[in-house]
Image (spheres, rainbow, N blue to C red):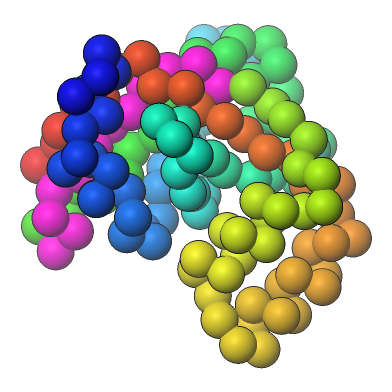
Amino acid sequence: MNKTGMTEEVRRFLQKPLIARLSTVDKDGYPHTVPVWFDVDGDDVIFISVRDTLKIGHIQANSKGSVSIGGQNEDGGGYLIKGQLSIEEDPGDVWMKRLIYRYESGPDAERDVASWAELDIVLIRLQPSRIVKVA
């Protein structure tokens, strides 16, 4: 296990294509929580978003955030991952395509790849500082 708590158990759990709940901090200091698709890159958790959403503005103003993944008995529990969020470009829509194919297949995936390619999508990277097991 590394210092953040990214164990092999956590890595195996994060392979499940569950819906995550990403929380950013709004201008008044309140959590702003939205459902998102996710994947992993090393120890980091990756999301995508259209550039002009509230969550992107929140991250630009305050990079602290968290994501809750799972938590239901049928999910095998879950994790709360806290850390620093950053915004990156997604050259060639690599992460956008990766996330779509992680959650969809066939005509649905192909349709979304084509339609989302027209959007201004950016990558959100969560670098974990703490991982907590939740029931």
Quarter of the view holding residue 76: bottom left
Is 33 left, or right, of 82 in this rendering? right
The residue depicted at 78 percent of the width and 35 percent of the height is: 89
The residue depicted at 16 percent of the width and 43 percent of the height is: 9
Q: Which residues are magenta?
A: 74-85
The residue depicted at 45 percent of the width and 43 percent of the height is: 40
Asked if residue 62 is positioned above or below residue 9 in the image, the reply reads above
The residue sitting at the right extreme is: 118
Q: Is-magenta flag for residue 83?
A: yes
Quarter of the view holding residue 7: top left
Residue situated in front as seen by the camera: 72 or 93: 93
Asked if residue 45 is positioned above or below residue 120 in the image, the reply reads above
The residue depicted at 50 percent of the width and 66 percent of the height is: 102
Picture coordinates of residue 126, whole percent (x, y): 50, 27
The residue sitting at the bottom extreme is: 107
Quarter of the image where the N terminus is located: top left
Is 124 left, or right, of 12 in this rendering? right
Picture coordinates of residue 119, whole percent (x, y): 85, 54
Picture coordinates of residue 33, whole percent (x, y): 47, 36
